[in-house]
Image (spheres, rainbow, N blue to C red):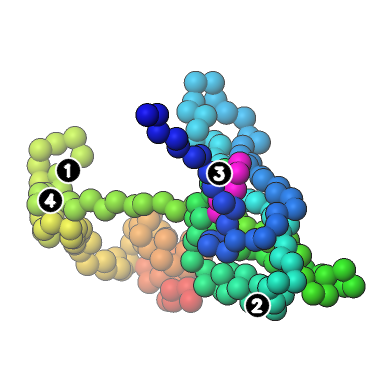
Amino acid sequence: MPQTIAIVPQRRSIGGVVAQVTIRESYRNDMEITQHPIENGANISDHAYLRPREIELEIGWDGTQNPADVFNQLKQLQATRQPFTIYTDRDVLSNMLVSGIATVTDQRTAYSWIGIVRCRQVNLVSTQSTVVGEGQFFLPGTDTPLTGASTFQAGTITTPQIDQGTQTLKPGTAANLQDPNLQQTFGAAGVQGLPGSPSGSAASPPA
């Protein structure tokens, strides 16, 4: 005997909150596209990305349920800030948060609750970390390892220390005027005042 299977549509719900009536659903699926020119042949996906999905639902409850309880239930869903899933007859939206709740109480809704709930998707991503194995740094274009603290252990890299030597002034000659290190430290005007320079007076490094 053939088996009868009943296909029941997915019931609308907002993070487990089921409205008694859904008046309107508005969806937004936007893509952000660069306005800058893209070189011919470039990967277009690097210049466009999907924005978080958005949905706006106008929903309501009749007087059989306390309007204050309905409002508090939606506000609690918003305050938890935990991603949830929205089920509609058009789509299933995951990783959603309540971005806004709007409602008006007047003579028509004094004993019921009708409101607009806006939800936005959170884009979740995963990152990976790579542990660097043991090895050495080498001089560019050669097989010569750098001396000093150039060997690194897994996950830790230490750059080598470079000895700059000792910088001393050369008294009594015009070499002070041509020394690029002194010009960088004292400036062109300051070098003129070093001992042995034509100005003949001492200079101090700039503050």
Find out whether residue 109 is within the magenta segment: no
| Residue type of the residue flagged with mark 4 | Gly
> Magenta span covers which residues?
86-90
> Which residue does the numbered mark 1 point to in the structure image?
139
Q: Residues within 10 Å of mark 2 (few under 14, many from 20)?
A: few
| Residue type of the residue flagged with mark 3 | Pro
Q: CA distance from mark 4 to mark 3?
A: 54 Å
Image quarter hosting the N terminus: top left
The circle on residue 133 is: 4
What is the secondary structure assignment of the residue under circle 2?
A: helix
> Which residue does the numbered mark 3 point to in the structure image?
9
Please state the horizontal and vertical placement of residue 103, each as a whole percent of the image.
Answer: 77, 68
**Residue at (45, 37) in percent of width and height:** 5
**Residue at (17, 58) in percent of width and height:** 155
Mark closest to the chain's N terminus, 1 or 3 = 3
Depth check, front residue: 147 or 33 = 33
| Residue type of the residue flagged with mark 1 | Leu
> Which residue does the numbered mark 2 point to in the structure image?
69
Badge nearest the viewer, 3 or 2:
3
Mark closest to the chain's N terminus, 3 or 2 = 3
